[in-house]
């Protein structure tokens, strides 16, 4: 099933300052998440942010970006799965969406459990594989494999962006293109 901006929500899981320093590929995760947020904002895709209780705040640059776009209203959670938090369910249900684009950390804990619970509730999960990670690559790889085996779709940040866009030459395309170029430049060694 192809992503549809009218059916999708972007879920940013626990990109927090107390976690990020030891996360594998942290710069890539932050850069790709920013691109996904920019795209979601331009295309009218709702953004939900979670923060694991007592692990700090969302990364400063992402938090600033979300605040500027009036998208920063994090769900503070004690459960690893977002779906087990009543506040998440209340907000998620208001959107009436069937697709969740999932990014964040840690892939083998909070992202995994959120994905499994979403799929158990008949929500299509699309993993932004280059925008999620764990402390070590092995945990991330194992988590992605398990989520895929359970029914999640694997994609890259650019795959997601262009699937949501559907067409070149539009105002949305032109608005997003600069963010894609900035992302590519940021990721180039």
Image (cartoon, helix red, strand yellow):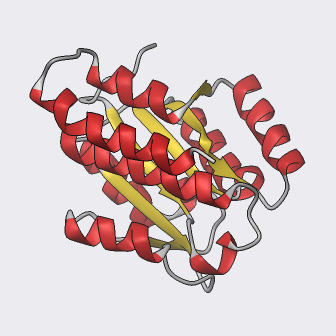
**Viewer-nearest residue: 66 or 77:** 66
Above or below, 56 relative to 141: below
Q: Nearer the viewer, residue 57 or 182?
A: 182
Residue 112 in the figure: left or right of residue 62:
right
Q: Would you say residue 83 is visible in this rendering? A: yes
Percent coordinates x, y for residue 54 in the rendering = 61, 86
Quarter assignment of residue 19: bottom right
Residue 26's x, y, as percent? Answer: 65, 60
The answer to which of 56 and 146 lies nearer the viewer is: 56
Percent from the top left, x then y, of residue 66? 30, 65
Q: Who's the residue at 41% across and 55% down the image?
A: 89
Q: Which residue of the protein is positioned furthest toward the right in this rendering? A: 138
> Residue at (28%, 40%) from the top-left corner?
178
Instruction: Pick whichever, 43 or 27, lies toward us.
Output: 27
Q: Name which residue lies at 32% across and 57% down.
A: 91
Residue 161 lies, in percent from the top left, at 38, 31
Which residue lies most toward the left here? 171
Residue farthest to the front, as pictured: 189
In this view of the protein, can residue 72 be seen by the observer?
no
């Amino acid at each position: 099933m192809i992503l549809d901006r009218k059916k999708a929500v972007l879920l940013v899981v626990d990109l927090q300052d107390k976690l990020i320093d030891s996360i594998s590929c942290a710069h890539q995760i932050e850069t790709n998440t920013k691109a996904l947020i920019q795209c979601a904002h331009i295309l009218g895709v709702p953004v939900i942010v979670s923060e694991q209780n007592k692990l700090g705040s969302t990364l400063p640059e992402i938090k600033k970006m979300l605040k500027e776009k009036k998208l920063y209203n994090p769900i503070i959670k004690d459960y690893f799965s977002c779906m087990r938090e009543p506040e998440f369910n209340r907000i998620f249900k208001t959107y009436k969406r069937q697709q969740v684009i999932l990014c964040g950390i840690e892939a083998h804990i909070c992202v995994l459990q959120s994905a499994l619970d979403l799929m158990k509730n008949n929500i299509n999960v699309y993993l932004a594989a280059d925008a999620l990670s764990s402390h070590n690559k092995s945990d991330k790889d194992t988590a992605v494999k398990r989520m895929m085996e359970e029914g999640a779709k694997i994609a890259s940040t650019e795959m997601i962006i262009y699937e949501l866009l559907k067409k070149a030459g539009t105002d949305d395309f032109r608005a997003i293109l600069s963010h894609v170029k900035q992302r590519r430049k940021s990721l180039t060694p």
